[in-house]
Amino acid sequence: MPVRVTLDALIVAKGLKARDLAAEVGLSETQLSLFRSGKVKGIRFRTLARLCAALDCKPGDLLDYDFDADDLSAPDDAN
């Protein structure tokens, strides 16, 4: 899937530690790490909002998308 999480670049640009961000947002370091690596299938809007508030950014600053025509015809995962 061509949706990529770009949170790492924002953490570096802001000079933050992932551990501190996780604590501020109310996530475990493991949960934040899984999101940073793109190994999650979804994220709650509330969590996304907390990340944006903590980082003073917008959701588009945390995610990126590379067009793939197959995304228009591929069935959604059942999980």
Image: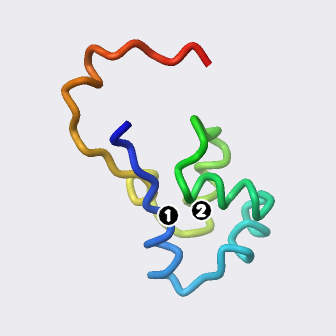
Q: Which of the image's four quarters has the N terminus?
A: top left
Disc number lying in front (2 or 1)? 1
The residue wearing badge 2 is: 53
User: Residue sitting at 43 percent across and 61 percent down?
Assistant: 6
Relative placement, left or right, of 34 versus 59 is: right
Image quarter for residue 24? bottom right
* Residue toward you, 35 or 50: 35
Of the residues under marks 2 and 1, which one precedes in the sequence? 1
Q: Position of residue 55 (x, y in %)?
A: 55, 69
* Label 2 SS: helix
Q: Amino acid at mark 2?
A: Ala
User: Residue sitting at 54 percent across and 87 percent down?
Assistant: 15
Q: Name, please, the residue furthest toward the bottom.
A: 15
Image quarter for residue 51? bottom right
Q: Position of residue 42 (x, y in %)?
A: 58, 36
Q: Is residue 25 above or below residue 46?
A: below
The residue wearing badge 1 is: 7
Q: Is residue 27 above or below residue 18?
A: above
Relative placement, left or right, of 35 versus 13 is: right
* Residue toward you, 66 or 26: 66
User: Residue sitting at 60 percent across and 82 percent down?
Assistant: 16
Q: Which of the image's four quarters has the C terminus?
A: top right
Q: Is residue 69 above or below residue 39?
A: above
